[in-house]
Amino acid sequence: MSADQQDEWKFLEFNHVRAARGARAARVAVDGTWLWMNPADIRNNIRDFGDHPELQKALQAYRGGVSVRV
């Protein structure tokens, strides 16, 4: 997977209740399948697949900057 393929990653939501419990709280779709991610998961995917804007949105959500629900 390449960072140039803009449609493969999609930040879907940040769930504050899951975050408060210490669970993975950023829901991200990859190739149509969604996963819950924590900051380490997101950073690892940025390292492995490139700096994608949707992964940056998910990481920013942990900093309180983005709250999206699709």
Image (cartoon, helix red, strand yellow):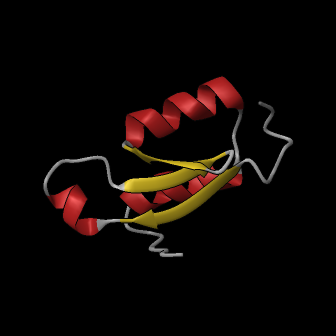
Q: Judge left or right: residue 19 versus residue 64.
A: left
x 23%, y 57%: residue: 19
Q: Which residue, as the protein is rendered here, is positioned at the far right?
A: 4
Q: Which residue, as the protein is rendered here, is positioned at the far front?
A: 33
Asked whether 52 or 28 is in front, the reply is 28
Q: Which residue, as the protein is rendered here, is positioned at the far top?
A: 48
The picture places residue 53, in percent across and down from the top left corner, at 69, 54
- Which image quarter is the N terminus in? top right
Q: Judge left or right: residue 17 versus residue 51.
A: left
The picture places residue 49, in percent across and down from the top left corner, at 69, 30
- Which image quarter is the C terminus in? bottom right
From this view, report whether residue 27 is shown above or below residue 64: above
Quarter location, residue 41: top left
Asked whether 7 or 20 is in front, the reply is 7
x 69%, y 40%: residue: 51
Q: Judge left or right: residue 16 versus residue 36.
A: left
Asked whether 68 or 60 is in front, the reply is 68
x 50%, y 34%: residue: 43
Q: How many marks?
A: 0
The picture places residue 9, in percent across and down from the top left corner, at 67, 49
The picture places residue 29, in percent across and down from the top left corner, at 58, 52
Q: Judge left or right: residue 11 versus residue 39.
A: right
x 53%, y 64%: residue: 12
Asked whether 28 or 4 is in front, the reply is 28
